[in-house]
Amino acid sequence: MSAPEKQGIATKGYATQNKDAKFGPFDFVRREVGPHDIVIDIAFCGICHSDIHQAKAEWEPMIPSIYPMVPGHEIVGRVTRVGSQVTKFKEGDAAGIGCFIDSCGECAACTAGIEQNCVKGCAMTYNGTEMDRETLTYGGYSKHYVVDENYALKVNATGDLSGVAPLMCAGITTYSPLKRWGAGPGKKVAVAGLGGLGHIGVKIAAAMGAEVTVLSTSPSKEQDARKLGAHNFLNTKDAEAAKAAVGSFDLILDTISAQHDYNFYLSLLGLEGVMVVVGVPTEPVPLNAFSLIGGNKAIAGSMIGGIAETQEMLDFCAEHNIMSDVEVISPDRIEEAYDRTVRSDVRYRFVIDMQNA
Ligand code: NAP
Ligand code: ZN
């Protein structure tokens, strides 16, 4: 007699079958609810540019793309079931999931609360495996997720949750380096790229008390930038304006998703300024040593944030009334949303409504 098939939660997602394919419905089974697990009925899932990079296999060979791929790591919804040992959530609570859903819990990174850097490799929300290194993970372009309560976030918003979803990735990816590098009163902070990450970065940096400038290739976004809380706007294609801004900033948060010249952006830093790279151009970027040594400048990187800091960011955003500016779409418009995001034609995050999918 063969072993009984594993029980699980049947669900429906939207998957792409290869880097050139279109998204289509995809039925699959989530794992059975364990004692520490919760089931989230997904209401909204944001479309992060990382979804596009991975769906289109742009990060290979560093990060292989596994198909069928159900992307999505900006997830919010309602808890509909809790395992027997769950204490953090109850049925009906709003909850979120970000970029990872598990980690070893024991290594130096996990114990320091930066589980995203787990030395064993954390379990990514999609395009990866659970910690058993066998069970494939599928993301939030789907109806349900089963997740350990310790890797889910508490969401204290009432009403429409669509603007909260993007905080799960774009929010923490900007909050963490802004905090670490001291954005606050008296600091001149520039946010490069006004997309999904950038627009939340502007709101958070302004709420932290910094003087905020947007560095953008899209002059049409100037008015929006100011409404989002930026004090200044620099069209980086305007050579004269760019020249006048050389040496201006203490901190640059680089959220740009495509190839760009790091040397140019570093020239905009003042003495001992720091540029933190969070955007991921798909090819290596040439860096001239002189861009760093003159002025004692630094370039740093940052990847999302740990669970505790993500919760701290959600609480900060709730306190400061920060949500994402979203365009809510149905799942049959994922391709259109991808095309428009790549063209920088999104104001400022596409979010998929999974409730009626
Ligand atoms: P997005 O919404 O597409 O925004 C990217 C912005 O970059 C665009 O809106 C555009 O802003 C600017 N841009 C695009 N092409 C450019 C070019 N050739 N030169 C200069 N600027 C350009 O993307 P996103 O979702 O915010 O993600 C941004 C990047 O961060 C992606 O690479 C993503 O994979 C990465 N990411 C990293 C982490 C992490 O943990 N480090 C987490 C999430 C995402 P303007 O129109 O204002 O110029
Ligand atoms: Zn993301």
Image: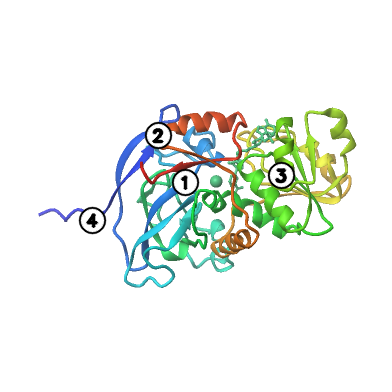
In percent of width and height, residue 261 lies at 74, 34
Q: Measure how far apart labels 4 and 2 are at the Cα level.
A: 25 Å
Quarter of the image with the N terminus in it: bottom left
The mark found on residue 16 in the picture is 2
- Mark with earlier residue (3, 4): 4
- Mark with earlier residue (2, 3): 2
Q: Badge 1: how crowded within 10 Å, few (<14), some, or many (20+)? A: many
| Vertical comparison of 156 with 27: above or below | below
Q: Measure how far apart labels 2 and 3 are at the Cα level.
A: 36 Å
Quarter of the image with the C terminus in it: top left
- Mark with earlier residue (1, 2): 2
Q: Measure how far apart labels 3 and 1 are at the Cα level.
A: 25 Å
Q: Which residue is mark 3?
A: 227
Give the residue drawn at x 49%, y 34%. 57
Q: Which residue is mark 4?
A: 7
- Mark with earlier residue (4, 2): 4
Q: Which residue is mark 1?
A: 45
Q: Are the residues at dot 4 and dot 2 in contact (C-beta closer than 8 Å)?
A: no
| Vertical comparison of 176 with 269: above or below | below
Ligand 2 is within 8 Å of the C-beta of the residue at disc 1: no
Which element type, helix, strand or loop, lies under badge 3? Answer: helix
